[in-house]
Amino acid sequence: MSEVVNSEGAKKKFSHPKGLYVLFTAEMWERFSYYGMRAILILFMTTDMAAEGLGLTTETAGAVYGLYTASVYLMTLPGGWLADNIFGQRKAVFYGGVLIMIGHLVLAIPGSPAIFFTGLAFVALGTGLLKGNISTLVGELYENEDGAKRDAGFSIFYMGINLGSFFGQLFVPLLAEYNWHLGFGLAAIGMFFGLIAYKVYAPKYLKEIGVEPKAKSIEKTGKSNNSVTLGIIAFILVLLVTLQLLGHIDVTTATGIAQALGLIIVVITMGYFINILFNGGLNLIEKKKVTVIFILFVGIAIFWSGFEQAASSLNLFARDFTNRFIGGWEMPAGMLQSFNSGFIIIFAPIIGALWVKLAARNINVRTPFKFAVGLVLLGLGFWVMVEAAQVAASGAKAGMFALILTYFLHSIGELTISPVGLSATSKLSPKKYLGQMMGIWFVGAALGNLIAGLIGGNFDPENVLEMPNIFLNVVWVSVGAGIIFFAASPFIKKWMGEVT
Ligand code: GLN
């Protein structure tokens, strides 16, 4: 890594390790394929067979969307384990990319739902291997004491993520207008480019990083956990059977399976935290910090459960109730989601600079407050959608501006929550649980995505009058959660100790 001292001598400018740009490129193309495909997923599933869609009901399609996107993030847990214990991060990322590409190729084959679900499964498994491990590799490019450089590296990496998703959400929906499977095929080509870049440049620029599996990580908490794990599994089974018998969950439907998965995630996560707090060998200070991680987990799950409706309910709203004409050209519905990534690319540096500026004036905006702001912004975005849905309920079409404004508010919210929460989680975590706590972060994304799918499933294009209410409920939950974060922030701050 080269370091340059600039002319004033005081401020050191530095260049990032070249490996960062290899990982940037690979992740950019991976996100191109992921978000590109996701932008058309629910549209494809709910389109009639006559128009070459899958002809599923919105409810089933929403549940499948939730199950798929949740699995993508849940799979990062076994993906991390496989890398740590068997493959090493480097190979895990490559194999993941290959599986993702195969998945998109399978999706590109027109045919039965069985082929389609096989494709989705490949993409989910592949992303599990790639997504978490590629971030781990980014972290490993920097020495431990390089905190600020590492943060800067992750910001650049986040740009790669959003550049990829921006173009994916632009081009995949555009091609899908002609033929769904061309859209899926383009996602495969995107991943192919990522793989080539990775294969050619990783050996040169990543050198030995991530080649050997870390192997030792998991062991530690061994024995006493077995009974806890069995206890949790037994509890979940009893709960599921009871709910099935009472008729609250019907696991023979996609919605029921999604609800069951949501329940399983919630129970296991709570069991995990309770176990760590009582059996984890932590002192009081560490226990308080772990409790804060749990609180942040709840916050991020609520945030994603609204935000990730971009490709479920908001996508359906874009298709069915939004006037997407620009002159004589009608913008494909899925394309509107690219506004999110576009706003992130523009505003990430601005928001980053804002925190630095405020800090320079001794105003340190701390994590719980930023969470409160993000959740309120999420709510405001949905409030715009309530208004738009009212227009739709009156029989007219809403203007595109509503969705664009919503994405703007959500993007600023994303910037005040997502990078902040990730970094706080890593700093609050006791060292020996770091890997697992980062896993918990992805579980938060999984839970949020699942709920976003289930809410999207409630979206009934035949029942327009219900729509404002669906969005209004999201407003209450997110603004409510924001207010709670705001009110609790003095306590949370105390428990966080020196961590900002
Ligand atoms: N957009 C970000 C990414 O794809 C964050 C998504 C998430 O964690 N839900 O990496």
Image (cartoon, rainbow, N blue to C red):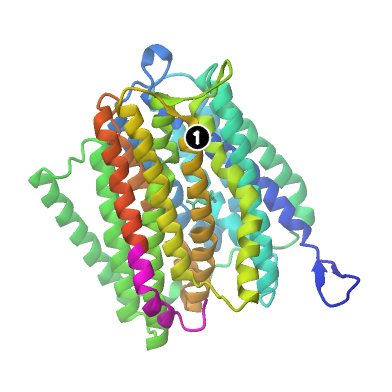
Residue wearing tag 1? 401
- Residue range in magenta is 483-500
Dominant secondary structure, magenta: helix
Q: Nearer the viewer, residue 274 or 13?
A: 13
Residue drawn at x 35%, y 30% as measured from the top left: 391
Compared with 347, 404 (above or below) is: above
Residue lying at the far left in this picture: please name it. 246
Q: Is residue 298 visible?
A: no
Residue at the location (63% across, 41% down)? Answer: 164
Picture coordinates of residue 203, whole percent (x, y)? 76, 53
Q: Which residue is situated farthest in the top direction here?
A: 50
User: Seen in the image, is 404 located left or right of residue 392?
Assistant: right
In the image, 414 versus 240, the foreground residue is: 414
Is 39 left or right of 30, judged from the image as shown?
Answer: left
Frontmost residue, 404 versus 304: 404
Residue 188 appears in the figure = yes
The three-letter amino acid code for the residue at tag 1 is Phe
Give the image location of residue 329, x and y in percent.
Answer: 57, 18
Quadrant for the N terminus in the image: bottom right
Vertical placement of residue 46 versus 178, above or below: below
**Direction from residue 429 to residue 274 in the image, left or right:** left
Residue 74: x and y, percent? 42, 52
